[in-house]
Amino acid sequence: MKSITITILETSDVHGNIFPINYGNNEPAGLGLAKIATVIKQERSRNPNTIVIDNGDLIQGTPLTYHFVRSNNKKINPMIKLLNHLKYDAAVVGNHEFNYGMKVLQQVIEESTFPWLSANILNDKGNPFIGKPYIIVDLEDGIKAAVLGVTTHFIPNWENPDHIKGLTFGDAFETTKKWVEKIRKQENPDLMIVSYHGGFEAELETGEPSEKLTGENQGYLICKEIDGIDLLLTGHQHRTLAGTVNGVPIVQPSFNGQAIGKVTLQLSKCDERWKITEAKPEILFVSEIEVDNRSIELVEEYEKETQAWLDQPIGQVIGDMTIDDPLKARLYDHPLIEFINKVQMDVAKVAISNTALFNNISKGFPSKITMRDIVSSYIYPNTLSVIRISGKDLKEALERSAGYFMLENGEVVVNPSFTTPKPQHYNYDMWEGINYTFDLSKPIGERVVELTFEGKPIRPDSKYDVVMNNYRAGGGGEYLMFKDKPIIKDIPLDMTELIANYILKRGTIKATVDENRKVIW
């Protein structure tokens, strides 16, 4: 009986990370595509029957990629330059591929020597908007591997509408089911791989829901209810997963280029058909892997330009806008959060704003501010929207945020629903322009004990114009009370640019707190 080993490698949610550094301080970090490149080259040299797929969220996420797009650079996108060099077989469109607009995405697709896939993102004629739902990879001994690309259909809940104009996002599960049946019938592949930029909505072992079943993640449903899938590559959730669901091998390789997913399949020929006799899914972390020097050389020029841009002085702070304890910055009014809200209100010309401290790494602004400080504190390429909401919506949003905290033995801790299966600190909002108090001794959903605007209680049926980032305005982070609300104004500039412009105009900014928000317990 003849047998062949096939290796499938998956990157996902690389988010613009090539170099093994933290751009906030330039300290070494055990991640990046330059390290992953070493693994890919090693695996290809060991086994010519190797398929390499990127599963989405590739071109956005670091100052390197942001500066490249911002500078209207005529050169090829650095991420694409590397994937071309590494001879990727295909890439799947992720939700963050749309962040810089359709023109940038189309350029990325044109520059790629590999096809981009997404079966469920459709143009106005009802066809896959990039033309390719799947590819066939021909391997040794005539083995045919089909790779179907699918993207979470939840994108309209987050993305700037101008960036996805004319597109329809079909249900990922239903699209996968349709195309797997079609490919099986028309192509008769020996191997059916689905690369899904989405994650798992349920516990892999039990099937118990692990999040609200919004449709954002459908990996468990795909494995459970679609026949004919030999391997599911996943992402989007930034989790580290390797295992099987309903007999289907699955991987999800972390995020920011910290790891690569590897699935080793043993195929044996029996009765003129190839069958999978063994499957080994695993995650290879690259922290101890040396960088691939050729990959570094290819993009070194981009990095030098980025570093020079990051160190440009912007202005200075009077007072203290640094963060030494992220939990305290969320519990008590903090100058950095107040400042960001002030920028948003100034740009939008409204009196109420919300924002978040996106992670626990941000150090805030030192006394002398550079672009590096801004991009390390405001890490997402958000734009702003002003939406009109009711007092009832506003209170519901505050209750959602108040659920971020829990009490354990009288101490305030973060609710695990905001940390598991991935950290979601960015879903705790802090507001400016209103006065409010959370009482953590009360049940979740009943914690807002004071809520006023301009000295008067906020009425459930009154209307208020609020500025917030586009992700939140679309209902992202389970803030469904904001979804489909009237959009009064869109501010299309990236928030880092708005912050930089605000500081450049003034030269000096002051660290202030008006103590409009309180948390008691």
Image: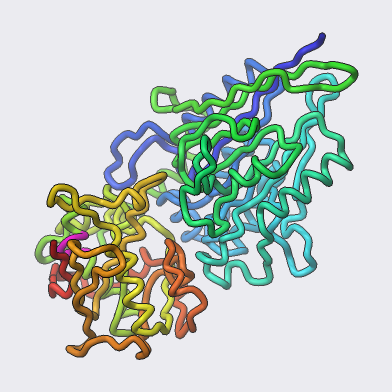
Q: Nearer the viewer, residue 421 or 73?
A: 421
Q: Could you tell me residue 404's position as x and y percent?
A: 29, 58
Q: Is residue 259 left or right of residue 28?
A: right
- Residue sitting at x 46%, y 52%: 211
Q: Is residue 311 visible?
A: no
Q: Is residue 264 left or right of residue 299?
A: right
Tell me which segment is drawn in magenta: 330-336
Q: Nearer the viewer, residue 34 or 240?
A: 240
Quarter location, residue 371: bottom left
- Residue sitting at x 82%, y 9%: 1
Quarter location, residue 9: top right
- Residue sitting at x 39%, y 23%: 288
- Is residue 332 within the magenta segment? yes
Q: Is residue 18 left or right of residue 109?
A: left
Q: Could you tell me residue 69's position as x and y percent?
A: 50, 57
Residue 194, placed above or below residue 311 = above
Q: Nearer the viewer, residue 300 or 187?
A: 187
Q: Could you tell me residue 377's position as x and y percent?
A: 29, 56
